[in-house]
Image (spheres, helix red, strand yellow):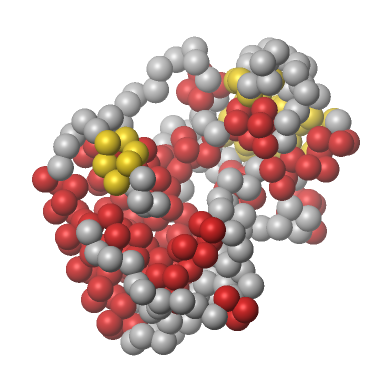
């Protein structure tokens, strides 16, 4: 990942180098192996993670469930006790919870063996598939999506959950891998949609986002055009400025920290329009 990520990378004034299908497959495979390695410990299997309601073992169950589905496996015919799972809110959250809850209570070795089988079969499927990122393939939710989008989604999801496992075990985040770079691009390229649609900032209103590292150091500006679309901009005076470290921004955008967490609020600087400021951190969470 580049040490300095700025508007030219995530805006329109410089083309990013396009990752190939093989690049994305390799990034996904590497981070899946990292999750598998750090979960293979009886002392860690039941540790809670920062993903609400999920243990380390639950994270592994989720990863194998989604990629197993993409490899052709049927989803478990299981109905959880939703009253016992208050963290599973909304259709996407409940859909993903089914595959996790179906494997709760299974021996660690059995879940890891299933993970290994899924990883081997899905890797072979991808290797034998198209290299054209625009090819339509089945996505994680059953509808057809371009191959590039599916690979990006799976790499992003696997990287975030691999960091959940690392955090639960007190291990450092892997911020400089290919999967981390895919995640950074996925999150930061979504800022215009967050500012223009989720937060519904008024036309002409500009967000200044100063990311102080480590690894990702950036000064980004996001505006709203006359058609209420979020756009990357340059050289404006921000109406609202957020200064934040990259790990904290990752936690905010993936819902791993509450927007009103006292520790987070002490570490960041948020200045400018008070009305927008009160809603910004919550709007930045892009995970279901």
Which quadrant holds the N terminus? Answer: top left
Work out whether residue 162 can be spotted: yes
Left of 21 or right of it: where is 129?
Answer: left
Q: Position of residue 258 (x, y in %)?
A: 71, 58
> As drawn, which residue projects farthest toward the right?
274
Q: Residue 131 occupies which quadrant of the picture?
A: top left
Residue that appears at 74% across and 40% down:
280
Residue that appears at 21% across and 39% down:
22
86 lies above or below 228: below
Q: Position of residue 265 (x, y in %)?
A: 78, 51
242 lies above or below 89: above
Q: Position of residue 31 (x, y in %)?
A: 34, 55
Left of 213 or right of it: where is 135?
Answer: left
Work out whether residue 263 can be spotted: no
Residue that appears at 79% across and 52% down:
266
Please tell me how many numbered marks the rendered image carries: 0
Q: Position of residue 20 (x, y in %)?
A: 25, 32
Frontmost residue, 267 versus 14? 14
Residue that appears at 46% across and 35% down:
185
Q: Residue 158 occupies which quadrant of the picture?
A: bottom left
């Amino acid at each position: 990942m580049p040490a300095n990520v700025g508007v030219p990378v995530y805006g329109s004034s410089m083309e990013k180098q396009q990752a190939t299908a093989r690049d994305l497959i390799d990034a996904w495979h590497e981070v899946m192996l990292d999750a598998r390695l750090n979960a293979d410990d009886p002392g860690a299997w039941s540790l809670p993670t920062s993903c609400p309601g999920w243990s380390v073992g639950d994270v592994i169950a989720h990863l194998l469930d989604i990629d197993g589905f993409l490899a052709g496996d049927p989803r478990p015919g299981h109905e959880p006790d939703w009253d016992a799972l208050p963290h599973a809110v909304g259709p996407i959250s409940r859909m993903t919870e089914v595959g996790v809850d179906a494997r709760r209570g299974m021996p660690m070795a059995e879940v890891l063996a299933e993970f290994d089988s899924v990883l081997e079969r899905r890797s072979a499927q991808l290797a034998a598939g198209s290299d054209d990122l625009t090819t339509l393939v089945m996505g994680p939710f059953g509808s057809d999506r371009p191959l590039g989008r599916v690979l990006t989604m799976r790499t992003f999801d696997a990287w975030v959950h691999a960091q959940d496992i690392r955090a639960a075990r007190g291990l450092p985040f892997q911020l400089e891998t290919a999967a981390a770079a895919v995640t950074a691009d996925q999150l930061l390229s979504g800022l215009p949609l967050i500012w223009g649609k989720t937060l519904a900032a008024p036309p002409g209103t500009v967000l200044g986002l100063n990311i102080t590292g480590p690894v990702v150091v950036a000064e980004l500006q996001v505006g709203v055009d006359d058609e209420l679309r979020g756009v990357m901009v340059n050289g404006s005076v921000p109406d609202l400025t957020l200064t934040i470290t990259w790990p904290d921004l990752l936690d905010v955008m993936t819902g791993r920290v509450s927007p009103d967490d006292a520790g987070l609020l002490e570490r960041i600087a948020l200045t400018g329009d008070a009305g927008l400021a009160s809603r910004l951190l919550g709007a930045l969470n892009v995970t279901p």
